[in-house]
C-alpha cells in the first residue's frame, strides 16, 4: 500500500509560512479532511519556493522538498500548484526535464500521479511585464504585504486605505505613485513586531533581488514554455480555472458605503485592467473539451480579456478542466469576505461573491481528483 504525499506549491506572491500566517492555511485543512473522507490518507506538505526565482530554480526546490519527505519507492506524489506553482509542477513532471539540482529528477517525476493547477498562467499574463518594472515591483510587494497584513490583523489601517485610494486616483502619475507605494509599504510593515518585520522584510527583499521569474511569465515567453514542456503520460493533469466579475458599477454598489471596500474595489479594478491586455493573437488555442467545459461553467466562452485580477482566464487551461469558478486570484485560497465569525478574510474586493460553499465545492473537486489518482 503506497504512502501518499500531497504538495501544495505557492505562486509568486511567495510566502508559505510566516509564523502563524499561512498561504495555504484554509486549503490545507479542508483538503486533508476531504481526502480522508474519500479514503485516502495523505501527508500534506506546503512547499517553500523562492517567490520570483526562475521556473527551473523553483521546480528544483520542489524536487528537493519531495526528495526530503516522500521517502521510499512506494511513495506516491500529488502536486497542487496555485498560480505559478502550477508551472513548477508541470516543469518537474515534463519528460527529459533538466533542473539545477543534483537530484535524479526523472526518478522523482515517475512517482507523481496527479497534478492540479489552480489559477495558473499556462499561457502567461500581461501583468508579468508590468511587475518587472520598478513601479510594478513595488506594487507586487504591496499586494503581497497587504495579503500578509490582512491574514494577520484582519483588516487594513484607515491611513493605508486612504493612501491606496490616492494611488488608484493617480495611476498614471509615475512619480507620485512611487512615493505613495513607499508610504503604504512602510505603514503596513510598521504594524508587525520587530521579529516578524524582519521575516516579512527579508521575504519581500528577495522579491526585489531575484526577478528571473517575471520575464518568463509574459504571454510571449510562455509560448515557448507551452510548446516545449510536454505532459508525462503517466500523470493525470487537471486545472481549476477562475474568472472574476468584471469591474462595473454593480461591483461598486456591492461594495456599499465602506470606504475601505470602495478603495479595495478600485485597486482590484486597476489590476484587472492590466491583466486584460493580452493581445488577441496570443490568446491560447483551447482543445474542444476545454472549450466545452468553459462554456458550460460560465455560460459562454470567456473573452480574451477575462481574468481573475492576475491571470487571464483562458490562460489557465491545461489538461482536464476540473472546476470553473467565479472568483479572483486569492479567493480560491480562502481569502474571501465572509461574516464576522468566519476566519476567512480578504482585502481585494472583486465583487465575485465567492464564498465558503463555493470554496468547499472547488477543493472537494480537487480532493476527488487526487483520490481517484491514488486508488
Image (cartoon, rainbow, N blue to C red):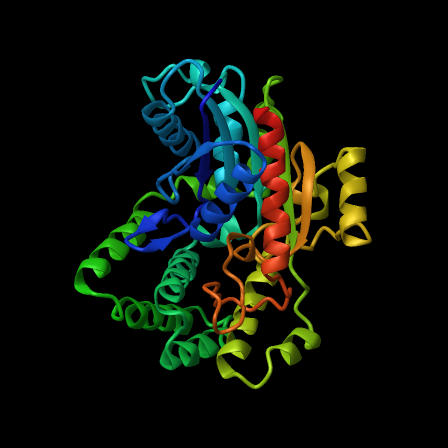
Which residue is painted at 55% across and 62% down in the image?
Answer: 271
The vertical placement of 12 against 223, above or below, is: below
The vertical placement of 341 against 73, above or below, is: below
Indicate the position of residue 272 as horizontal and vertical percent values: 60, 61
Residue 105 in which image quadrant:
top left
Residue 254 in which image quadrant:
bottom right
Residue 306 located left or right of residue 202: right
Residue 229 located left or right of residue 304: left
Indicate the position of residue 11 as horizontal and vertical percent values: 46, 45
Total numbered labels placed on residues in the image: 0
Which residue is painted at 28% across and 52% down in the image?
Answer: 205
Q: Nearer the viewer, residue 60 or 374?
A: 374
Q: Is residue 83 visible?
A: no
Which residue is painted at 35% across and 23% down in the image?
Answer: 67
Which residue is painted at 59% across and 67% down in the image?
Answer: 269
Residue 234 in which image quadrant:
top right
The vertical placement of 148 against 237, above or below, is: below
Q: Residue furthest left?
A: 194
Quarter of the image with the C terminus in it: top right
The vertical placement of 155 against 50, above or below, is: below
Q: Residue furthest bottom?
A: 257
Q: Is residue 284 visible?
A: yes
Indicate the position of residue 71 as horizontal and vertical percent values: 36, 20
Residue 166 located left or right of residue 95: left
Indicate the position of residue 253 as horizontal and vertical percent values: 65, 80
Amino acid at each position: 500500500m503506497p504512502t501518499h504525499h500531497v504538495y501544495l506549491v505557492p505562486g509568486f506572491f511567495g510566502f508559505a509560512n510566516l509564523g502563524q500566517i499561512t498561504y495555504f492555511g484554509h486549503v490545507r485543512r479542508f483538503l486533508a479532511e476531504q481526502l480522508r473522507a474519500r479514503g485516502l490518507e495523505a501527508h500534506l506538505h506546503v512547499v517553500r519556493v523562492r517567490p520570483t526565482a526562475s521556473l527551473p530554480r523553483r521546480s528544483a526546490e520542489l524536487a528537493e522538498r519531495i526528495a526530503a519527505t516522500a521517502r521510499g519507492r512506494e511513495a506516491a506524489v500529488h502536486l497542487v500548484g496555485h498560480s505559478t506553482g502550477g508551472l513548477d509542477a508541470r516543469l518537474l513532471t515534463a519528460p527529459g526535464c533538466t533542473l539545477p539540482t543534483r537530484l535524479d529528477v526523472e526518478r522523482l517525476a515517475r512517482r507523481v500521479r496527479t497534478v492540479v493547477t489552480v489559477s495558473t498562467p499556462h499561457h502567461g499574463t500581461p501583468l508579468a511585464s508590468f511587475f518587472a518594472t520598478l513601479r510594478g515591483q513595488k506594487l507586487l510587494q504591496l499586494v503581497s504585504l497587504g495579503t500578509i497584513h490582512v491574514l494577520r490583523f484582519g483588516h487594513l489601517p484607515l491611513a493605508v486605505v486612504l493612501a491606496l485610494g490616492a494611488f488608484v486616483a493617480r495611476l498614471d502619475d509615475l512619480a507620485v505613485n512611487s512615493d505613495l507605494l513607499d508610504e503604504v509599504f512602510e505603514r503596513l510593515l510598521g504594524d508587525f513586531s520587530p521579529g516578524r518585520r524582519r521575516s516579512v522584510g527579508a521575504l519581500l527583499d528577495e522579491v526585489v533581488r531575484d526577478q528571473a521569474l517575471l520575464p518568463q511569465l509574459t504571454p510571449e515567453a510562455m509560448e515557448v514554455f507551452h510548446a516545449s514542456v510536454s505532459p508525462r503520460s503517466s500523470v493525470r493533469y487537471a486545472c481549476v480555472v477562475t474568472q472574476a466579475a468584471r469591474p462595473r458599477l454593480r461591483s461598486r454598489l456591492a461594495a456599499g458605503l465602506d470606504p475601505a471596500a470602495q478603495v479595495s474595489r478600485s485597486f482590484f479594478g486597476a489590476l484587472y485592467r492590466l491583466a486584460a491586455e493580452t493581445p488577441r493573437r496570443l490568446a491560447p488555442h483551447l482543445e474542444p473539451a476545454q472549450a466545452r467545459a468553459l462554456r458550460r461553467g460560465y455560460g459562454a466562452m470567456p473573452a480574451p480579456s477575462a481574468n481573475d485580477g492576475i491571470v487571464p482566464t483562458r490562460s489557465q487551461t491545461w489538461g482536464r478542466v476540473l472546476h470553473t469558478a467565479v472568483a479572483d486570484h486569492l479567493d480560491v485560497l480562502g481569502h474571501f469576505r465572509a461574516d464576522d465569525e468566519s476566519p476567512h478574510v480578504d482585502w481585494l474586493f472583486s465583487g465575485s461573491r465567492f464564498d465558503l460553499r463555493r470554496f468547499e465545492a472547488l477543493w472537494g473537486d480537487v480532493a476527488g481528483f487526487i483520490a481517484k489518482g491514488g486508488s
